[in-house]
Amino acid sequence: MAAGLASKWSRVGRSLLGGLGNNLSNLLNTSLEMACNNSLSQQRTFIQMRTVLKVVDNSGAKKVMCIQALKGKKGARLGDTIVASVKEAHPNGKVKKGKVVYGVVVRAAMQRGRCDGSEVKFDDNAVVLVDKQGQPIGTRVFGPVPHELRKKKHVKILTLAGHIA
Amino acid sequence: MRIEKCWFCSSAVYPGHGIQFVRNDAKIFRFCRSKCHKNFKMKRNPRKVKWTKAYRRLHGKDMTQDSTFEFERKRNRPERYDRNVTENTLKAIKTIDKVRSRREAKHIERRKKGKKGQLMREAVKELEQSINLVKAPAVLSEDPSLTLPKIMVKASQPQESQRMEE
């Protein structure tokens, strides 16, 4: 079967070469390889401009897009604050669509190293909206939150949380 | 500090090793190394993956019930530090570990030995008891090769009884 496939590819290659030249066939092969590699291992990265995050409090917003990560050249991680724009909101809530808000990242898909040497990662990217002083706008927080927030002095969010990871 | 158990292979996760994955329903999965983590991401069931402890316990390859497992239960209450208690616990851990590993090795040895001995004993018993299903008793007495050889034992008692009679 492999020999047959190889002969087919060589035929295609020869026709391409005859038409267009070496470069096109090479490009096609490398792009296919890259696609296969990407689908196998997902590399999780920072939360940066244009990252859409889920809102896990009852402030009224549902989805929020990061505009700026305060602190951090490459982006925000677990426990950092970001500036975001509300993209999707509940019809009657404290926060409306299109508003610029501050938020604290409470769940990040990218792993964060803990002081004992282990690493934690969550299932999704989630944020809790806060005001400029750092106090949460909502009154409830859903889902697990990490205890990295304690070091960042977001004690209020920890008290509201149902589960501390 | 606590030595956790890997969710996939059930081995010990020492501090500084492995990845902790927190799912949105607040269930925490701890993995000892990327091998286990990658298998988890592939959605493999540890009970079906041959090299995990879960598979081995499920299929009877390793010991499941033993009193030595009672000592290693998860306790969430921190104990007040007592020097004697700590010393005794450390000594106990060593001996319990030795006992447990000895018992596990015995279990595996027993499993590997197979049923040969048991089958031999059963065959001998069956030959003694139910040979009449195959051959008639008259034929048995004639042909000694059909029964097991009877061992002759020298008995000195009849000589004494003769002397007494005299």
Image (cartoon, rainbow, N blue to C red):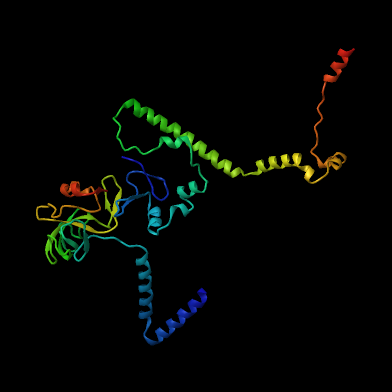
Q: Residue at x 38, y 51 (%)?
A: B33
Q: Nearer the viewer, residue B120 or B33?
A: B120
Q: Residue furthest left?
A: A133
Relative side of A27 to A73, left or right: right
Q: Where residue B85 sits: x, y (%)?
A: 35, 27
Q: Quadrant of residue A35?
A: bottom left
Q: Residue at x 49, y 52 (%)?
A: B50
User: Is A33 rendered above or below residue A25?
Assistant: above
Tell me how many marks there are: 0
Q: Residue A153, can we see it?
A: no
Q: Where residue A36 sits: x, y (%)?
A: 38, 69
Q: Where residue B105 sits: x, y (%)?
A: 53, 39
Q: Residue furthest right?
A: B166
Q: Residue at x 38, y 31 (%)?
A: B90
Relative side of B68 to B143, left or right: left
Q: Quadrant of residue A102?
A: bottom left
Q: Residue at x 15, y 54 (%)?
A: A138
Q: Residue B89, can we see it?
A: yes
Q: Nearer the viewer, residue B120 or A79?
A: B120
Q: Nearer the viewer, residue A67 or A103?
A: A103
User: Is B150 rendered above or below residue B56?
Assistant: above
User: Is A1 rendered above or below residue B91?
Assistant: below
Relative side of B71 to A106, left or right: right
Q: Residue furthest bottom?
A: A19
